[in-house]
Amino acid sequence: MYPEAIRIIKDEHFAIAAVLHTLRHLINEIHAGAEPNFPLLKAILDYIVAYPDHWHHPKEDKYLFAAVRRRSPDTEALVAKLEREHALGYPMIETMKQQLLCYQANDPGAKEDFFFTAVRYIDFEYAHMKTEEEVLIPLAESLLQPEDWAEIDATFLENDNPLFGIKPKEEAELLYQRILELAPAPIGYAS
Ligand SMILES: [Fe+2]
Ligand SMILES: [Fe+2]
């Protein structure tokens, strides 16, 4: 049976890619002369913090990467590279948040700084997800045993349904809805 954890990771990559695509689209529009939509740019950064940063990457590190590493020490270089990319992504988002504030305040050069980091982050994150889908996941499928998947799947499914508090997935959904409310067509509903 196809592991649930892989299905969940691919679904999450799809959602992250959609938001990154929106960010790239907005940057292109601003380059073409559109006024910046600051609430929307802020909503996108909030989403990236809540979803890939606080939710998706830690789950990969803790369960999937750990299991792959356990089954085959030969995967060390690849797993370490992907973990390092997770770690490198966090400060980039923090930088982008600061740069967005400066851009909104009209600081000299802040717009270019924000665009520079945002485009780097988008390319970086796409390349990271591509390596996971094309290299790490196929390796995991060949290396991991049914008992590994049983444990990883259970954790991923349980993480999707926490018993109390705000559900991380629910929070991400709310933030995604906010992006759609703020984004004009064809991406969102705003006019
Ligand atoms: Fe990742
Ligand atoms: Fe991922």
Image (cartoon, rainbow, N blue to C red):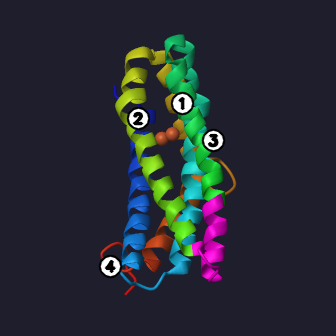
Q: Earlier in the sequence, mark 3 or mark 1?
A: 1
Asked if ligand 1 lies within 8 A of label 1, the reply is no
Between residue 75 and residue 2, name the one nearer to us. 75
Q: Earlier in the sequence, mark 2 or mark 4?
A: 2
Is residue 95 positioned above or below 73 on the image? below
Is residue 35 positioned above or below 139 on the image? below
What distance separates the C-alpha of mark 3 from that of mark 4?
Answer: 34 Å
Instruction: State the quadrant of the C terminus.
Output: bottom left
Between residue 113 and residue 51, name the one nearer to us. 113
Mark 3: which secondary structure?
helix
Instruction: State the quadrant of the N terminus.
Output: top left
Between residue 90 and residue 137, name the one nearer to us. 90
Q: Earlier in the sequence, mark 3 or mark 4?
A: 3
Q: Which residues are magenta?
A: 95-110
| Residue 81: image tag | 1
Residue 48 is left or right of residue 1, and the answer is right
Residue 109 is left or right of residue 165, and the answer is left
Report crowding for label 4: few under 14, some 14 to 19, many 20 or more residues within 10 A (C-alpha).
few
